[in-house]
């Protein structure tokens, strides 16, 4: 039994504000709960009528029914809610669903009403869902705690919906029903005053009736608690996440790298790293969760897809969409092709995608042969309904395949819908269009890949140098990096021009001369960096052009090469976030940056480069030196380790240059420490 059992599996329910007057929220909620098999207690403090079953308090209603409600559903104004919920808790209620709006989302007095309700939760321990939500649905319990028309007719099934919005919860529930998928639990969180996304996900982790979870996220205030809940749940069932806020740029941090990463990006990064499958819209969410509720692949870093199509054009659309998303559609081995030649006309294409020409009774054997190919982990089949040629649902259901099937079926609307439902009941995810079929396949692939990533060990933080409070200059920052095994230029700190000239003699040209001032983070903007200095005359000219500074830094100049930006900063919600981006203007203009939460596995760190649009610049394109992936991975893991030090607020290497031997060197470094007063009790650890 979980802490939310009284909320989602109550023995008895009380409706506060219950009414017999049509059109009132209390009447709609009472009607919705009519199918609930347990007692439903009606409470109306303003117009009690015990003879008609309406009592003035929860206590009196409980006495009359001989049972205290586990759950109270409040359909009363915000101003009256806190007191009513407190009284209900005193009468034995363990959970409350607060439907009314007018709380923190409304501002003004609403914030005071929410604070008062939070105090009730604190004082009594009652669990509260809401406020400002249209409720939840548990069809398998015949529990419809919602006032939205039509939801009582939803069928029970294996998918749970956890939505920030009550409206989105209901929209997804109806869309799943249209797709032929039943609902296990559908929840709109509203303001999440008490019961949060993580609470519900942890509850679902204990529910054997859940096969897949659709997660809709507007804000992620819980940070690591949310990702831990997703991680725990994905051990057993897949989670598909839709994160709202793509257009919200936000203030990631003061650093150049950080400013490129939105809160939307960080949230998506966190959920994906925890094992969730990410989608971009609600239609894809339904397709993905439909597929994953019926099929789940074993862990696999890159599953191969076999495509069989009875019509060439749609099959090409499906194949093209898969490949454009990086999904592997590999050629079939010669043995498979030979077997297919014996089954299909000579003019058909046989090497993935496999074109059968049109549906025929041989389709069963074709699908079986493709599924048995050693490079295939999922077999996707497209076909139009042509009953005079073949009974497509029967053919697919009869196929004894070595891999899971995903079907895409077109045809007359009602027939196609019926076919998709039949195949779904047979455990075969079935889409209506090639695009939807691609979403289904991609969801299965991403879930399998995520499970592989989650099997990798997270790299524990190594010992980091002791850092004294206060500002850190570039030289000290580079010393810290060097102690972590990150290559830095040979350099000398110079107190005056004479020392700079001595450093030039010692290091030899060319050198870079920089001002060394903890107050100036971006030295190039003030003329504080002079490059290519080879002679003492050039050094004198450079010093004359530079602003005054407490000290100078003279460094050996690194050879030319591609440049990256690497940084770590402390997100206020998720804690340490690692970023890798392309150098120059690509990161800023293209948003070409990959993110991970720290700590992370070496597998995750290694994969970050592959997510950059400009990755070929660092992999040897046009004769360029390919970066040493092991060295780059070491840099990323070292910065992640540095972020584990609670004293570090942010560290950025910009640029990180790729040298002719493939190694990388930190040409500039910024290290910012946290105020000691901010290091205790943070929500980001």
Image (tube, rainbow, N blue to C red):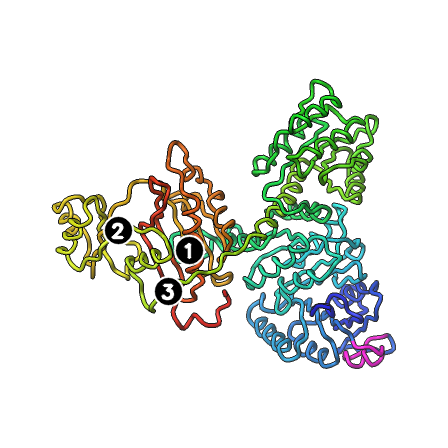
| Helix, strand or loop at mark 2 | loop
* Label 2 CA crowd tier, 10 Å (few <14, some 14–19, many 20+): few
- Residue that carries the numbered disc 1 in the rendered image: 638
The mark nearer the N terminus, 2 or 3, is: 2
Could you say which quadrant of the image residue 287 lies in? top right
- Distance between mark 2 and mark 3 Cα atoms: 24 Å
- Residue that carries the numbered disc 2 in the rendered image: 490
| Helix, strand or loop at mark 1 | helix
The mark nearer the N terminus, 3 or 1, is: 1
Q: What range is drawn magenta here?
A: 53-68
Could you say which quadrant of the image residue 97 lies in? bottom right
Picture quarter with the N terminus: bottom right
Work out whether residue 639 can be spotted.
yes
| Helix, strand or loop at mark 3 | strand
For the residue pair 100 and 186, the one nearer the viewer reads as 186
- Distance between mark 3 and mark 1 Cα atoms: 17 Å
Residue 609 percent across, percent down from the top left? 46, 44
Residue 51 percent across, percent down from the top left? 87, 77
On screen, residue 617 above or below 189: above
- Mark nearest the camera among 2 and 3 is 2
Circle count: 3
Q: Which mark is residue 673?
A: 3
Please report the residue visible at 84 percent of the width from the left and 69 percent of the height from the top. 38
Work out whether residue 431 can be spotted.
no
Please report the residue visible at 69 percent of the width from the left and 36 percent of the height from the top. 379
Residue 321 percent across, percent down from the top left? 60, 35
For the residue pair 465 and 608, the one nearer the viewer reads as 465
In the image, residue 274 lies in the stretch drawn in magenta: no
* Label 1 CA crowd tier, 10 Å (few <14, some 14–19, many 20+): many
- Mark nearest the camera among 3 and 1 is 1
- Distance between mark 1 and mark 2 Cα atoms: 20 Å
């Amino acid at each position: 039994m979980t802490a939310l059992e009284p909320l989602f599996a109550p023995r008895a329910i009380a409706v506060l504000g219950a009414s017999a007057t049509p059109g009132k929220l209390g009447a709609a909620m009472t009607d919705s709960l009519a199918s609930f098999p347990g007692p439903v207690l009606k409470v109306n403090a303003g117009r009690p009528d015990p003879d008609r079953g309406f009592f003035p308090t929860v206590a009196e209603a409980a006495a009359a029914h001989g049972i205290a409600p586990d759950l109270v559903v409040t359909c009363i104004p915000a101003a009256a809610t806190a007191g009513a919920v407190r009284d209900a808790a005193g009468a034995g209620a363990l959970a409350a669903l607060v439907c009314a709006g007018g709380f923190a989302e409304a501002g003004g007095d609403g914030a005071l009403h929410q604070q008062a309700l939070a105090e009730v939760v604190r004082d009594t321990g009652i669990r509260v869902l809401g406020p400002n939500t249209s409720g939840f649905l548990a069809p398998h319990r015949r529990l419809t705690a919602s006032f939205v028309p039509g939801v009582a007719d939803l069928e029970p099934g294996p998918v749970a919906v956890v939505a920030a919005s009550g409206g989105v919860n209901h929209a997804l529930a109806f869309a799943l029903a249209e797709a032929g998928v039943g609902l296990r639990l559908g929840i709109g969180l509203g303001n999440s005053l008490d019961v949060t996304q993580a609470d519900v996900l942890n509850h679902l982790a204990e529910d054997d009736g859940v096969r897949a979870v659709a997660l809709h996220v507007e804000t992620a205030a819980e940070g690591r608690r949310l990702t831990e809940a997703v991680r725990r749940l994905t051990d057993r069932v897949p989670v598909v996440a839709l994160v709202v806020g793509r257009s919200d740029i936000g203030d990631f941090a003061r650093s150049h790298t950080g400013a490129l990463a939105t809160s939307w990006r960080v949230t998506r990064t966190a959920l994906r790293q925890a094992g969730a499958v990410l989608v971009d819209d609600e239609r894809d969410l339904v397709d993905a969760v439909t597929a994953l509720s019926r099929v789940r692949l074993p862990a696999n870093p890159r599953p191969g897809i076999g495509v069989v199509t009875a019509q060439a054009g749609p099959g090409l659309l499906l194949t093209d969409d898969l490949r454009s998303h990086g999904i592997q559609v590999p050629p079939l081995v010669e043995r498979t092709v030979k077997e297919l030649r014996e089954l299909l006309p000579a003019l058909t294409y046989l090497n993935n995608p496999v074109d059968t020409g049109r549906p025929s009774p041989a389709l069963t054997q074709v699908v079986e042969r493709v599924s048995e190919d050693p490079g295939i982990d999922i077999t996707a089949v497209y076909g139009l309904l042509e009953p005079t040629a073949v009974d497509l649902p029967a053919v697919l259901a009869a196929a004894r395949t070595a891999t899971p099937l995903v079907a895409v079926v077109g045809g007359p609307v009602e027939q196609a819908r019926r076919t998709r439902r039949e195949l779904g009941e047979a455990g075969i995810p079935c889409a209506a269009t090639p695009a939807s079929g691609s979403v289904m396949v991609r969801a299965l692939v991403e879930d399998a890949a995520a499970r592989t990533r989650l099997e990798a060990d997270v790299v524990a933080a190594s010992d980091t140098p002791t850092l004294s409070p206060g500002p850190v200059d570039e030289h000290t920052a580079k010393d810290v990096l060097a102690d972590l095994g990150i290559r830095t230029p040979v350099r000398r700190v110079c107190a005056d021009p004479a020392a700079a000239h001595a450093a030039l003699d010692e290091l030899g040209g060319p050198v870079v001369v920089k001002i060394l001032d903890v107050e100036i983070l971006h030295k190039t903007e003030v003329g504080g960096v002079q490059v290519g200095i080879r002679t003492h005359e050039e050094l004198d000219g450079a010093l004359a052009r530079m602003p005054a500074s407490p000290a100078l830094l003279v460094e050996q100049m690194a050879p030319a090469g591609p440049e990256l930006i690497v940084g770590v900063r402390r997100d206020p919600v998720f804690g340490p976030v690692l970023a890798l981006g392309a150098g120059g203007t690509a990161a800023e203009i293209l948003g070409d940056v990959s993110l991970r939460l720290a700590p992370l596995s070496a597998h995750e760190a290694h994969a970050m480069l592959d997510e950059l649009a400009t990755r070929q610049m660092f992999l040897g394109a046009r004769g360029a030196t390919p970066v040493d992936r092991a060295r780059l991975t070491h840099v990323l893991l070292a910065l992640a380790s540095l972020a584990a030090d609670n004293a570090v607020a942010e560290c950025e290497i910009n640029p990180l240059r790729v040298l002719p031997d493939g190694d990388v060197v930190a040409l500039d470094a910024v290290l910012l420490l946290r105020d000691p007063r901010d290091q205790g009790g943070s929500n980001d650890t």
